[in-house]
Image: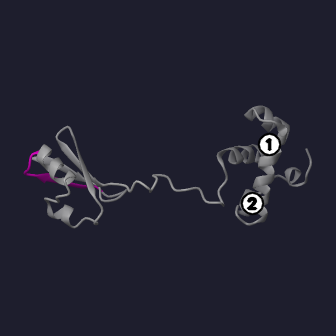
């Protein structure tokens, strides 16, 4: 008996005991054959199987052009913009942020302006408001 774990999506796991050798089951699935009813009812995308310690794991392959992570939308901030923004909300000046992140003060101000511009365009929720001192062009 071979244990089969079928992962049809990111949250579902179907566990079965199959009366087929693990190597034979892997070879069949990887060849495009769906030897079990549960696999025949799977979506039409290609399935891939791998054997791990007598257990066969079967899952749909991800298309080559689809990355695992979602693409960043224009409304999201870059990693550095997020860092600068969070430090500014905590009350640090642009000079202090520059020292902490090993950036120039001018670069910090650029990131702060990018975040402020996105706030004014409505791309960033108003719950993430800056301290008043940063909204005016001080510093």
**Dot 1 lies on which element?**
helix
Q: What x and y, as percent, mark residue 94?
A: 83, 41
Q: Which residue is mark 2?
A: 118
**Dot 2 lies on which element?**
helix
39 or 31: nearer the viewer: 31
Residue occupying image coordinates x 73% and y 66%: 122
**Label 2 CA crowd tier, 10 Å (few <14, some 14–19, many 20+):** some
User: What distance separates the C-alpha of mark 2 from that of mark 1?
Assistant: 16 Å
24 or 86: nearer the viewer: 24
Q: Which mark is residue 59?
A: none
Residue occupying image coordinates x 80% and y 47%: 110
- Per the rendered image, the range of residues in magenta is 13-21
Indicate left or right for 25 with 119 as reference: left
Q: Which mark is residue 108?
A: 1
Quadrant of image for the C terminus: top right
Q: What x and y, as percent, mark residue 31?
A: 19, 53
The answer to if 19 sits in the magenta stretch is yes
Indicate left or right for 107 with 75 as reference: right
Q: What x and y, as percent, mark residue 25?
A: 14, 50
Residue occupying image coordinates x 74% and y 63%: 126
Q: Is residue 129 above or below residue 95?
A: below
Residue occupying image coordinates x 21% and y 51%: 30
116 or 63: nearer the viewer: 63
Q: Is residue 85 above or below residue 40?
A: above
Q: Disc count in the image?
A: 2
């Amino acid at each position: 008996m071979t244990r089969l774990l079928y992962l049809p999506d990111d949250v579902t796991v179907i566990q079965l005991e199959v009366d087929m050798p693990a190597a034979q089951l892997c070879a069949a699935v990887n060849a495009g054959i769906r030897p079990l009813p549960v696999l025949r009812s799977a979506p039409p995308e290609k399935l891939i199987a791998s054997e791990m310690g007598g257990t066969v794991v079967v899952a749909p392959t991800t298309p080559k052009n689809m990355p695992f992570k979602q693409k960043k939308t224009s409304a999201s901030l870059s990693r550095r913009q997020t860092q600068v923004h969070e430090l500014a909300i905590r009350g640090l000046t642009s000079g202090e942020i520059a020292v902490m992140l090993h950036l120039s003060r001018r670069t910090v101000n650029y990131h702060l302006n990018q975040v402020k511009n996105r706030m004014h365009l409505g791309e960033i929720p108003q719950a993430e408001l800056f301290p008043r001192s940063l909204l005016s062009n001080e510093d």
